[in-house]
Image (cartoon, helix red, strand yellow):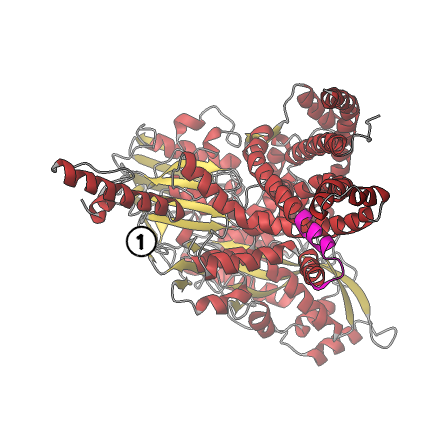
């Protein structure tokens, strides 16, 4: 009986027995007791689950299914249990998931999906098209974006248990990109029917079709998922257990990566200032892939109702005073891309890389302010403004500080105003009590879903966050956006968005500054983490530890 | 016996006082929270990065925010009267469950840090007093000053770097090894290894306070007549220090320590954040950020109970330390 043998036994925490002569058996028994004691002691110091992967999140998700709440933390965990119809590769072209094939009618008004056969929910009930149809109707009602994403959906039909047909009143060219697990989760009809989706217990103890089964949620501490042995994609998943830990402190997250107590995190899970130090560690890898399902654009939004920003010359002057290169290099430590357009560079087919007509030029800025009749009163300061910033990222504050410094050079005094996210959202979107604000907006997977809401005059709705905050209104822009939302021909649609970008670049209701590069950090032993467009937000069925 | 009857008296007196105090705390907290800008729906929409007018209205309805403030307060008090702390729509869980899942961890961290700081602080203080104005006193004073002035999060991070990154002896965060499925002693051991670093970093500041207090209190007591009397009747210096000087010097220390118990409950937020310790401070902070006021009110209510109970205990401790102190 050797230590190796005991090591091979599952949970080898007791003396092993064999058929040996009494005396030898006794000594061996003693040896094996010693050995297993050592092993057991080791087991609670360093858990011996080789096939566990641990994900780190800064905060705890409010729910484990991204149905009524799509906070980033909820997106991070939802897809492991609750899958969607499709997944997407790096350039956002669809791949099968719960749907094996799909077809869009030539007029773009009918989507039909063939669903995978033999899929079962974690509670053993069969998954059918009725579940998918129920989910889409539910999402249309309760998902924060559902009402806009599925706006054109007139009916969802189930001709047979493996077929789903979605009928639209007019084409929705972005829709085929909306079926990812996190964006359009397919939930079990038998658990949600006739209940209130937001307070359904499935949000805390999810049942899905995914590669991982929910096991335990220790509030404020961790979530544990276990391998689903009956997964339709057998032999996936490749790991036995997925753990999600919440570490609110950025420095502590860096340390957790360093000490190996967490294996991966995404959307740049550590402070940018720590990246250089962490990059020198041999056991950590950095990945830019797996972030193409959601590009962000960092923006400076002018309140066009403000007495100064109503004058386009003032906005031009501000545009001339800001150097995007400094923002990339100093504020984002190089982990960002310059953008002049509200459509992120990552959405390659739509993004217009043409530089802003208002290049960095302090003299031109000062001249414009002089022309606007805003001459310095005390020889230095022309006027005073308050700048708010979205507190959800640390870069927001630093960017606001940079803008304050830049604008001081052209005689605009800026006071920064810090507040938490709730106060910020209320101030900007409900009270509209702001001059200008550093904010971010997600492009999501398509400009109609992510960008239109920021510029469309009809999306100026008080009390609705991440709508048209500037109060921009241009009939031509409205027309272009509305047409692009239903344009079935991809080329024409790209043309419409190009025109839209030209106009807003000229009008500057806001300044689009940079698109942050989101890094996925992972231990070198973790492989195949970012195989889809949503990377770590995906179902992680292919992830393995080696 | 006397102690017991005192305990009874003290408890009944506290119970009579506690009810209006707690009610006042609840109503005041509730009304103060109404002044905070933004509500839970704003937070959820802010986190989600998307919303429509309909989802905002649905969220407000779900959180009961569409009701007038006084109705909301009445509803809350109604829940309390039925011994329920209400429901957190954000976490889709009863507040009582959320708090009870954190309370054991909070009490564990709080009490271990409290005991650690008292024991070490009093030991340091007694040592410094014994060597007053000589070099061991000076050296220890300097160390205590460092403990006093170093912020808790910094101490936390530094001991993480030393003990878990460099030496690899102790885990860097969390309260237990996830997924190890431990039971019995192994589970206790696991919990304790996770507890060491957070309680040390939480205890540092308080250790310094108690050390300084003990030192000065002992030096003051040493000059009093009964100490001279004890010396005159031939007691050894160690017995005098322990039985007469230290015991009398403990009155101010325990008074301040009692006040600190409430502080520890709230002051643990920083340490909980650095160590990812699932305590109530963090729950309260998250509740503020999320405008999840049912949770926050629950935490505040429970904290006020803890403070009241702590005061009773300190009261009793005083009676034991110095029988002359009578409860009124």
Residue in front for this viewpoint, B227 or A447: B227
Report the residue at 69% width, 39% height from top.
Answer: B261
Report the residue at 74% width, 19% height from top.
Answer: B5
Q: Is residue A272 above or below residue A320?
A: above
Q: Is residue B74 above or below residue B185?
A: above
Query: Is residue A300 found left or right of A151 in the rendered image?
Result: right
In this view, the residue farthest toward the bottom is: A363
State the extent of the magenta-drawn residues as a range.
Answer: B122-135
Instruction: Name the residue carrying label 1.
Output: A545
Q: Position of residue A374 (x, y in %)?
A: 82, 71
Query: Is residue A23 found left or right of A73 in the rendered image?
Result: left
Q: Is residue A265 above or below residue A216?
A: below
Q: Image quadrant for the N terminus of chain A? A: top left
User: Can the viewer see residue A428?
Assistant: no
Residue A130 found in image quarter: top left
Magenta segment's dominant SS is: helix
Q: Position of residue A441 (x, y in %)?
A: 57, 55
Report the residue at 42% width, 34% height from top.
Answer: B184
In this view, the residue farthest toward the right is: A378
Residue in front for this viewpoint, B206 or A458: B206
State yes or no: residue B129 in magenta.
yes
Query: Is residue A474 found left or right of A130 in the rendered image?
Result: right
**Secondary structure type for disc 1:** strand
């Amino acid at each position: 009986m050797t230590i190796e043998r005991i090591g091979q036994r599952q949970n080898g925490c007791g003396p092993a027995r064999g058929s040996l002569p009494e005396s030898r058996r006794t000594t061996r028994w003693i040896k094996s007791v010693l050995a297993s004691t050592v092993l057991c002691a080791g087991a609670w110091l360093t858990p011996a689950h080789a096939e566990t992967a641990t994900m780190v999140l800064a905060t705890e998700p409010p729910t484990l299914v991204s149905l009524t709440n799509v906070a980033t933390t909820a997106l991070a965990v939802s897809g492991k249990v609750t899958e969607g119809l499709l997944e997407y590769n790096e350039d956002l072209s669809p791949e099968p998931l719960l749907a094996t094939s799909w077809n869009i009618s030539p007029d773009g008004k009918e989507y039909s999906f063939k669903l995978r056969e033999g899929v079962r929910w974690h509670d053993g009930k069969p998954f059918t098209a009725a579940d998918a149809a129920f989910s889409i109707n539910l999402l249309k009602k309760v998902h924060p974006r559902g009402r806009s994403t599925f706006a054109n959906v007139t009916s969802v039909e189930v001709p047979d248990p493996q077929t789903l047909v979605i009928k639209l009143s007019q084409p929705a060219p972005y829709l085929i990109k909306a079926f990812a697990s996190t964006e359009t989760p397919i939930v079990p009809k038998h658990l949600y029917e006739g209940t209130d989706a937001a307070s359904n217990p499935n949000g805390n103890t999810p049942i899905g079709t995914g590669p991982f089964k929910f096991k335990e949620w220790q509030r404020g501490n961790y979530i544990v998922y276990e391998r689903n042995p009956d997964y339709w994609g057998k032999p996936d998943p490749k790991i036995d257990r997925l753990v999600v830990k919440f570490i609110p402190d950025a420095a502590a997250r860096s340390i957790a990566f360093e000490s190996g107590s967490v294996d991966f995190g995404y959307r740049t899970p550590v402070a940018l200032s720590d990246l250089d130090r962490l990059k020198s560690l041999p056991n950590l890898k950095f990945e830019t892939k797996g972030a193409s399902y959601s590009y962000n654009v960092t923006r400076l939004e002018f309140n066009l109702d403000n007495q100064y920003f109503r004058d386009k010359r003032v906005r031009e002057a501000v545009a001339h005073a800001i150097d995007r290169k400094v923002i990339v290099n100093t504020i984002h430590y190089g982990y960002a891309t310059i953008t002049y357009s509200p459509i992120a560079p990552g959405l390659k087919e739509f993004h217009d890389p043409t530089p802003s007509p208002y290049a960095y030029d302090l003299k031109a800025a000062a001249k414009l302010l002089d022309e606007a009749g805003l001459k310095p009163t005390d020889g230095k300061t022309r006027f005073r403004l308050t700048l708010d910033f979205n507190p959800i990222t640390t870069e927001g504050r630093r960017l606001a500080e940079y803008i304050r410094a830049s604008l001081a050079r052209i005689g605009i005094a800026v006071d920064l105003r810090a507040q938490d996210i709730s106060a910020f959202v209320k101030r900007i979107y409900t009270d509209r009590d702001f001059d200008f604000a550093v904010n971010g907006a997600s492009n999501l997977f398509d400009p109609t879903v992510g960008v239109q809401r920021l510029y469309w005059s009809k999306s100026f709705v008080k009390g609705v966050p991440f709508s048209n905050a500037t109060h921009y209104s241009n009939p031509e822009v409205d027309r272009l956006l509305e047409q692009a939302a239903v344009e079935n021909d991809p080329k024409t649609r790209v043309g419409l968005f190009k025109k839209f970008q030209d106009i807003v670049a000229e009008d500057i209701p806001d300044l689009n500054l940079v698109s942050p590069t989101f890094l996925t950090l992972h231990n070198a032993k973790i492989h195949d983490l970012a195989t889809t467009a949503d990377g770590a937000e995906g179902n992680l069925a292919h992830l393995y530890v080696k | 016996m006397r102690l017991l009857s005192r305990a009874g008296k003290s408890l009944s007196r506290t119970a009579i006082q506690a009810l209006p105090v707690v009610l006042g705390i609840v109503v005041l907290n509730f009304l103060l929270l109404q002044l905070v800008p933004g509500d839970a729906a704003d937070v959820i929409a802010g986190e989600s990065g998307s919303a429509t007018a309909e989802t905002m209205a649905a969220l407000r309805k779900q959180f009961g925010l569409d009701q007038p403030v006084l109705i909301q307060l009445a509803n809350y008090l109604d829940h309390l009267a039925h011994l329920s702390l209400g429901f957190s729509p954000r976490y889709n869980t009863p507040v009582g469950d959320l708090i009870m899942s954190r309370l054991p961890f909070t009490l564990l961290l709080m009490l271990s840090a409290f005991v650690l700081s008292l024991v070490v602080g009093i030991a340091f203080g007694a040592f410094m007093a014994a060597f007053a104005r000589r070099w061991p006193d000076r050296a220890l004073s300097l160390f205590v000053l460092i403990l006093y002035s170093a912020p808790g999060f910094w101490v936390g991070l530094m001991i993480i770097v030393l003990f878990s990154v460099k030496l690899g002896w102790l885990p860097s965060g969390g309260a237990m090894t996830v997924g190890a499925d431990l039971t019995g002693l192994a589970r206790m051991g696991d919990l304790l290894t996770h507890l060491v670093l957070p309680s040390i970093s939480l205890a540092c500041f308080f250790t310094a306070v108690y050390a300084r207090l003990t030192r000065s209190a002992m030096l003051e007591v040493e000059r009093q007549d009964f100490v001279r009397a004890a010396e005159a009747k031939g007691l050894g210096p160690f017995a005098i220090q322990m039985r007469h000087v230290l015991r009398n010097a403990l009155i101010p220390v325990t008074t301040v320590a009692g006040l600190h118990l409430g502080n520890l409950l709230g002051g643990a937020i920083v340490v909980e954040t650095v160590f990812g310790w699932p305590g109530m401070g963090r729950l309260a902070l998250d509740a503020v950020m999320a405008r999840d006021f049912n949770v926050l009110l629950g935490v505040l209510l429970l904290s006020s109970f803890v403070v009241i109970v702590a005061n009773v205990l300190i009261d009793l401790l005083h009676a034991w330390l110095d029988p002359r102190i009578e409860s009124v």
